[in-house]
Image (tube, helix red, strand yellow):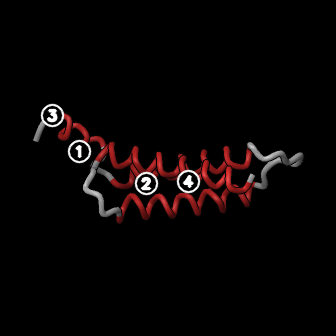
């Protein structure tokens, strides 16, 4: 076990911390998704929360049940990138 793997293992040992980070990025992605739509009233908080819950559910499933054998910070970074990519793709499909 090299030093980098040992450090990553210490920092990302808790799945709870990783899931909290995924929840925060889901809320940020959801808010940014609705920010870019031209709505004079602004985004509805219920809709933003519901969309954030959907993004979080998909990313948590990808994080917890992914068949890929990457772990630690790389896995968390990949799932965050997946969140950003899916929200961006959905935005361009809806525009």
CA distance separating discs 2 and 1: 16 Å
Q: Which residue is mark 4?
A: 86
Disc 2 residue crowd, few under 14, some 14–19, many 20+, Cα 10 Å: some
Pick whichever of labels 4 and 2 is earlier in the sequence. Answer: 2
CB atoms of marks 4 and 2 within 8 Å: no
CA distance separating discs 1 and 3: 10 Å
Residue sitting at x 38%, y 47%: 76
Pick whichever of labels 4 and 1 is earlier in the sequence. Answer: 1
Q: What is the quadrant of residue 5 in the picture?
A: top left
Q: Which residue is mark 3?
A: 3
Q: Nearer the viewer, mark 3 or mark 2?
A: 3
Q: Position of residue 82 (x, y in %)?
A: 48, 51
CA distance separating discs 4 and 1: 27 Å
CA distance separating discs 3 and 2: 24 Å
The quarter of the rendered structure image containing the N terminus is top left
Pick whichever of labels 4 and 3 is earlier in the sequence. Answer: 3
Q: Position of residue 83 (x, y in %)?
A: 52, 51
Q: Residue furthest top?
A: 3
Q: Which residue is mark 2?
A: 19
Q: Nearer the viewer, mark 4 or mark 1?
A: 4
SS at mark 4 in the image: helix
CA distance separating discs 4 and 2: 18 Å
Pick whichever of labels 2 and 1 is earlier in the sequence. Answer: 1
Residue sitting at x 29%, y 41%: 11
Q: Nearer the viewer, mark 4 or mark 2?
A: 4
Q: Position of residue 81 (x, y in %)?
A: 47, 46
Q: Which residue is mark 1?
A: 9
């Amino acid at each position: 076990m090299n030093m980098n793997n040992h450090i990553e293992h210490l920092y990302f040992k808790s799945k709870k911390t990783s899931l909290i980070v995924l929840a925060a990025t889901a809320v940020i992605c959801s808010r940014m998704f609705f920010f870019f739509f031209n709505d004079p009233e602004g985004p509805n908080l219920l809709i933003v929360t519901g969309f954030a819950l959907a993004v979080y559910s998909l990313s948590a499933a990808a994080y917890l049940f992914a068949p890929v054998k990457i772990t630690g910070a790389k896995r968390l970074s990949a799932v965050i990138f997946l969140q950003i990519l899916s929200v961006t793709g959905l935005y361009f499909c809806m525009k």
